[in-house]
Image: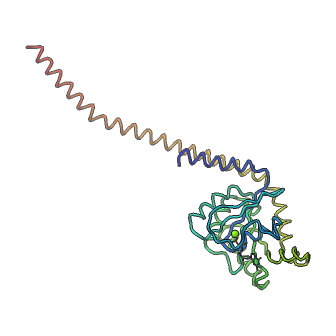
């Protein structure tokens, strides 16, 4: 940890202060339906804003600056570990995280480990900031999806000590409903329900953001204090080493001086 690290940390915290709107970030495995979900939530129904079916070529996040909120799409968690670390560093920008999962089964190990990062980042208020969204409910039997949702709830509770809200949605059904003006499909997609929940979270997001930033700043100041102490210790150690190194040198100089004095007195006597 050097001064560049600390400066970067401060800049990340400061960047968040600049967003005046709540920031939603979608995370999840590749192909889980993140980009499709964000297109629905941002009302990009006919023409997609977030590219779906994307072959993961870049690790860049993509941002939609809406009237009242900002939505950020991320590339996906499973390509390689390096990118997961990068994704995790973006967690600071998020007020609300949509953790997207396609319900073929329960949460996988790398999903749990990323959720762990998220839960620790939000601390005791994690449930107000992280929403688990199960997509593609049109593809599976409702009973099966209910069972998976229950299992995921258990995994979060037992492995992360975290009780999330879990929504089951269908992006395709919502899209079809909107395009054909079929309200029944729209309702049955459960996206409207999710939107209401997200709005209620956004209302509280700004005050939480202030509290989180204060926590982050004090954690950072503590880390700087520790680094300062460590440097001070290293300085004392170096000083001791240097003076230790001089002992031999001083002895040699002393011997030389004594020798020269003897020689000088010898010459004086001549
Ligand atoms: N049947 C169905 N397919 C979906 C749904 N959401 C996304 N998909 C499809 O799943 C694939 C991956 O979606 P995408 O949004 O690109 O996933 P991402 O990699 O997580 O961003 C695409 O072919 C989407 O059309 C859904 O709710 N139902
Ligand atoms: Mg995508």
Question: Residue 92 at x, y = what percent?
Answer: 68, 55
Q: How is the image coloured?
A: rainbow
> For the view shown, which residue lies furthest in the top direction?
269
Give left or right: position of 239 versus 154.
left
Question: Residue 193 at x, y = what percent?
Answer: 85, 70
Q: Quadrant of residue 123?
A: bottom right
Which residue occupies the foreground of this view, 52 or 131? 52
Q: The C terminus lies in which quarter of the figure?
A: top left
Question: Residue 7 at x, y = what percent?
Answer: 60, 45
Say above or below: 221 vs 21: above
Give left or right: position of 200 versus 228.
right
Q: Quadrant of ligand 1?
A: bottom right
Q: How many numbered marks have been drawn onto this rendered protein structure?
A: 0
Which residue: 75% across, 51% down?
A: 19
Say above or below: 134 vs 230: below
Give left or right: position of 23 versus 262.
right
Which residue occupies the foreground of this view, 131 or 123? 131
Which residue: 80% across, 69% down?
A: 47
Say above or below: 186 vs 260: below
Which residue: 61% across, 73% down?
A: 109
Question: Residue 46 at x, y = what percent?
Answer: 82, 71
Q: Quadrant of residue 48?
A: bottom right
> For the view shown, which residue lies furthest in the left direction?
270
Give left or right: position of 249 versus 139.
left
Which residue: 23% across, 27% down?
A: 254
């Amino acid at each position: 940890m050097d001064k560049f690290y600390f400066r970067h940390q401060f800049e990340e915290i400061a960047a968040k202060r600049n967003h005046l709107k709540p920031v939603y970030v979608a995370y999840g495995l590749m192909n889980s339906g993140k980009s499709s979900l964000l297109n629905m939530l941002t009302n990009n129904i006919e023409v997609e804003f977030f590219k779906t079916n994307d072959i993961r070529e870049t690790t860049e996040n993509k941002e939609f600056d809406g009237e009242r909120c900002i939505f950020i799409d991320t590339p996906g968690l499973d390509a390689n570990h390096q990118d997961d670390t990068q994704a995790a560093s973006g967690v600071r920008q998020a007020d609300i995280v949509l953790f997207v999962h396609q319900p073929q089964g329960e949460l996988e190990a790398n999903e749990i480990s990323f959720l762990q990062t998220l839960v620790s980042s939000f601390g005791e208020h994690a449930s107000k900031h992280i929403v688990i969204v199960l997509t593609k409910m049109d593809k599976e039997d409702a009973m099966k999806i209910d069972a998976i949702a229950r299992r995921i709830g258990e995994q979060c509770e037992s492995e992360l000590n975290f009780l999330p809200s879990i929504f089951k949605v269908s992006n395709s059904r919502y899209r079809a409903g909107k395009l054909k003006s079929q309200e029944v499909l729209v309702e049955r997609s459960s996206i409207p329900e999710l939107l209401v929940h997200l709005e209620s979270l956004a209302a509280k997001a700004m005050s939480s953001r202030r509290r989180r930033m204060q926590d982050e700043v004090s954690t950072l100041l503590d880390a700087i204090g520790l680094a300062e102490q460590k440097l001070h210790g290293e300085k004392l150690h170096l000083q001791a080493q240097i003076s230790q190194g001089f002992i031999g040198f001083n002895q040699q100089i002393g011997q030389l001086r004594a020798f020269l004095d003897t020689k000088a007195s010898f010459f004086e006597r001549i």
